[in-house]
Amino acid sequence: MKRLSLLFVLLASVLVANAWHKRCDEAIVIVATKHLTPDAKKMVKKYLGKSYADDVHYLYISQRELAKQKKLPTGARNIHDLHLDKSFKPRAVKYDSYKAIVEALEVIRNRKSYPAKEVTTALRVVINLMCDMHNISKVRLAGYPHSYKNFTYTMPMREWGPKAVLTKTFKWRDSWRGWDGGYNFFSANYWAEDMDIFIGERYEEYAKGSLLDWAEESGRKAAYYLEFCKPDARIPYMEQKSMGVVNYEMMAKTSCRLAALLNEVAVK
Amino acid sequence: MATEISYARTKSNEVNMKKFLILIAAFLAFTGVRSVKAWSGFTHAYSVYIAEQNLTPEAKKMCRHYLRHTLAYYASWMDHWKGADAFKSVNARHSVMTTADGKGVDFAFDEYGKPYGVTPGECMGYLRDAIEELGEGKYKNLPDSLVRQRLINMVHYVADMHCPAHVNFPKNLYPNFVNDKKIKKQNGKMESFHTFWDCLPQQGRRSWLIEDCAKNLNKASRKQIKEWQSGTLEDWGRDIAEAGYIAYDMFLNKSAISDFTPEELEKASALVEKMAVMSAYRLAQVLNTIFKY
């Protein structure tokens, strides 16, 4: 049964593009790699080979193949979303990133009783969905129906002067695609270098907690923004700008937490 | 500084340049240049990246200590937050104002030609004050947050002041020519002088990363670098004013992008590339000098 469930996880994972730009995901994985214990490094090398960062793209490549074959299970694309109730606890839904990560971690922990191919898949699922779970636009929150939609909203061009009356339109999910400033011309390695400096001595602080705590954090942050960021709303200038800062911090946290998870499950 | 662009080119480079110019022309004609009001984030980022590659180990370490990021992360930070109330007072400083004779840069005027009063205006003035405030080890006695903000501003302003569109001449030198003169693109839409120069380096290079730019656009020789980095801020101001003249003159008697000859487009492109690299080496020089102590 677990094997079947994992198969669905894989099928679903490969059919939806990640919430963050692929170079962001690559950078997260590059930074996470630096924080792996020798055991975790050995495990990752055994199941994923040398190209750990390339596995971020594995799902995208498979996505194209599966799309051609029209093999998408109904509702499976929701596997990338984090479904939370009003108290920020995971809801029991068929396809959910939290649930999928828990299942995949179980496979990795008991890897000796699973075929190597399934362990490889489980590792890829963890890498992919840890990124998704920390993306604010992927949180589906009870009580916030607009969290299910890619709605548009506006912000003033400036807080002051004549341009304060002009507005700029944004799409909710696009606001959480990349880094502060929206740079698309930094390589994954350069972003990883930057993220490494940003994390500095904060690794322990960021990696603290359980998967449940991290899901709750994503939920609380999403709730904060969804409170005023609604379809067709005009949001304050500073709140829109702060999204980039929060987004970057969530990426840095993801890299630390991904490393912490892999370090934990790699223990013999 | 000589007005001619002195990049030595091999024959293969010339072929590449022709291809590149065709790409520029296609972009200008059909898609237009992105409407932004500062050197585009792309140019800022690769310029600052080149600067970072030329920092001394000490300067690099200190910059990262204060910024908790790479230099390029903050390349466009000032543009990103320019609409915030907190940055209202420094918003006019993204440009430089030339002296009355147009031969150098005035350190005490904002981009609209109005004196700031007590606070010296425009980015050259800011740079001078920041060097004075942080240099010779004085940064060690300042709060980290202040040093950090000065660095963030300098990283942006040094690049901005080297953009030809950010040079403002007195109106008597270019009557009826403010830096937002509009020219017509082939799709019928209007393009401003400012946007043309701001976004020119990115045309045809949408998929380039900053590392690609550093590798392909940084063609400066050691002699050139030494020449660019030497001299006072006033000397730098004269170079900047001279680039401004080239940019303004190129736009005189033009009402449409199609009025530009391929040679003029090549000259324009080479000018902005040179200015971006020049700003990179000068930023490196400023930061290396500040963190020498």
Image (cartoon, coloured by chain):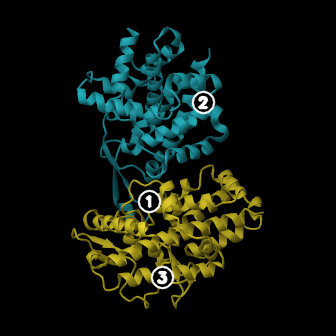
Chain colours: A cyan, B yellow
* Crowd rating for badge 2 (residues with CA inside 10 Å; few <14, some 14–19, many 20+): some
The mark nearer the N terminus, 1 or 2, is: 1
Residue drawn 55% across the image and 56% down it = B72
Identify the amino acid type marked 3. Glu
Residue A93 in sight: no
Distance from the alpha carbon under mark 3 to that under mark 1: 43 Å
Above or below for B267 versus A12: below
Distance from the alpha carbon under mark 2 to that under mark 3: 56 Å
Residue for badge 1: A159
> In screen coordinates, is B100 left or right of B14?
right
Q: Nearer the viewer, residue B208 or A83?
A: B208
The image's mark for residue A207 is 2
Residue B77 is situated, as x and y percent measured from the top left of the image, at 52, 57
Q: Can you say which quadrant of the picture contains the N terminus of chain A?
A: top left
- Mark 2 vs mark 3: in front: 3
- Which chain letter matches label 2? A
Residue drawn 58% across the image and 63% down it = B155
Residue drawn 40% across the image and 78% down it = B179
Residue drawn 66% across the image and 79% down it = B231
Q: Can you say which quadrant of the picture contains the C terminus of chain A?
A: top right
The image's mark for residue B4 is 3
Examine the image and state in which quarter residue A192 appears: top right
The image's mark for residue B271 is none
Q: Nearer the viewer, residue A21 or B38?
A: A21
State whether discs 1 and 2 lie on one chain. yes
Residue B196 is situated, as x and y percent measured from the top left of the image, at 37, 71
Identify the amino acid type marked 2. Ala
Q: Nearer the viewer, residue B174 or B269?
A: B269
